[in-house]
């Protein structure tokens, strides 16, 4: 049976990838993209879908209750997938207010509208509210600790992760108090196409191609579990199709890397591309590869950020055993796909750069 999805944050990195993935895999479903188009929301991320009768776009803020409610009712939405969030830790440290407004108040606004649409006045319409969260709500791991699991105690260490933890609790509360049919997924670090160039991989890549310093916090030893964005979309699809209402599923990539090793691998892959494709030197004359020198020379160690969690890792046993989830990409294959995309879409990332 065809579904009607409302996807919040649909013009952002993960949201846009999810919309493209879902419409490719479920062409009979209707998808309504909902986005406020703040700095990280980009209509160009969804441009290829214009003209598709199954797709529509609503330019609005998730904190606007009336607009959310009207959208759910007008489009007969039965599935809400909530990506919309402020997500950059550095920005949350310098300006936490926006994170509280979007991640906490915005999530609560969506929950209220969903409850009014699907659960009010004795109605019990079939529905699903899927909330997309982060592994950062669990805090930081030591080197020998097992990965985060679903019953892990929450220990958020930044305004960003604290705001996401609050939104997770609100989603849980609306299920247990009001009967809203919810699921939550907590994912590890995503990477791939449409990634706004302030995060580690796209920042380093765009700096490399312009011959700019490649910044690495501290000594680069911080460890993350990396998840190719399409593997994340596939995991959410499995949760929507077979996940237990009220449950949480951790989605990871089984790819733990420290930041310095990631930057080294990226530098080496870029150097290899310049060697194999002479046309790149003409397109990116400021890149080290155009001069035949090592891209690693651009690496610059900078002061560590405040409250920088040392290690994140996901234990994906639950979603693997219950729903058959397996990431299709290793970090090496996913990074090659990401590099291919950025090299082919210079017209997308150039306008987003601030310096």
Image: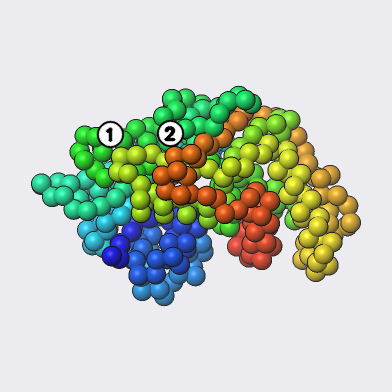
Q: Say above or below: 163 vs 336.
A: above
Q: Determine crowd level at label 2: few under 14, some 14-19, many 20+ residues with C-alpha closer than 10 A.
A: many
Please provide percent x and percent y for residue 50: 44, 71
Q: Determine crowd level at label 1: few under 14, some 14-19, many 20+ residues with C-alpha closer than 10 A.
A: some
- Residue tagged by mark 1? 173
- Residue tagged by mark 2? 150
Which residue is rendered at x = 20% and y = 50% of the image?
Answer: 118
Along the viewing direction, whichever of 198 and 81 lies nearer the viewer? 81
The label nearer to you, 2 versus 1, is: 2
Which residue is rendered at x = 63% and y = 54% of the image?
Answer: 334
Please provide percent x and percent y for residue 8: 38, 52
Name the quadrant containing residue 247.
top left
Circles 2 and 1: CB atoms closer than 8 Å = no
Which residue is rendered at x = 45% and y = 67% of the image?
Answer: 24
Q: Which SS class for mark 1?
A: helix
Residue extending furthest front?
A: 321
Which residue is rendered at x = 70% and y = 43% of the image?
Answer: 262
Image position of 125 (left or right of 105): left
Please provide percent x and percent y for residue 5: 33, 59
Along the viewing direction, whichever of 176 and 195 lies nearer the viewer? 176
């Amino acid at each position: 049976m065809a579904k009607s999805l409302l996807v919040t944050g649909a013009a952002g990195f993960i949201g846009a990838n999810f919309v493209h993935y879902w419409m490719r895999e479920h062409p009979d479903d209707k998808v309504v993209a909902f986005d406020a188009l703040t700095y990280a929301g980009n209509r160009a991320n969804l441009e290829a879908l214009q003209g598709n009768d199954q797709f529509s776009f609503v330019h609005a803020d998730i904190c606007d209750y009336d607009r959310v409610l009207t959208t759910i009712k007008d489009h007969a939405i039965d599935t809400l997938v909530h990506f919309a969030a402020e997500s950059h830790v550095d920005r949350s440290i310098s300006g936490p207010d926006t994170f509280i407004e979007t991640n906490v108040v915005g999530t609560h606004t969506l929950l209220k509208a969903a409850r009014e649409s699907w659960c009010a006045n004795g109605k019990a319409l079939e529905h699903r509210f899927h909330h997309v969260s982060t592994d950062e709500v669990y805090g930081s791991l030591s080197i020998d600790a097992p990965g985060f699991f679903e019953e892990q105690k929450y220990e958020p260490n930044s305004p960003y992760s604290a705001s996401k933890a609050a939104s997770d609790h609100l989603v849980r509360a609306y299920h247990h108090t009001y009967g809203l049919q919810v699921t939550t997924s907590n994912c590890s670090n995503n990477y791939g196409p449409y990634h706004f160039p302030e995060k580690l991989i796209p920042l380093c890549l765009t700096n490399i191609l312009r011959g700019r310093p490649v910044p690495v916090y501290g000594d680069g030893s911080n460890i993350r579990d990396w998840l190719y964005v399409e593997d994340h979309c596939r995991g959410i699809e499995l949760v929507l199709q077979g996940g237990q209402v009220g449950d949480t599923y951790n989605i990871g990539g089984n790819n733990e890397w420290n930041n310095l090793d990631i930057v080294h691998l990226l530098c080496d892959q870029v150097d290899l591309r310049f060697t194999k494709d002479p046309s790149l030197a003409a397109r990116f004359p400021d890149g080290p590869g155009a001069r035949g020198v090592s891209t690693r020379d651009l690496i610059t160690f900078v002061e560590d950020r405040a409250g920088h969690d040392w290690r994140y890792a996901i234990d994906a046993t639950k979603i693997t055993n219950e729903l058959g989830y397996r990431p299709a990409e290793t970090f090496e294959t996913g990074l090659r796909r990401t590099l291919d995309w950025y090299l082919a879409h210079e017209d997308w990332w150039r306008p987003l750069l601030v310096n």
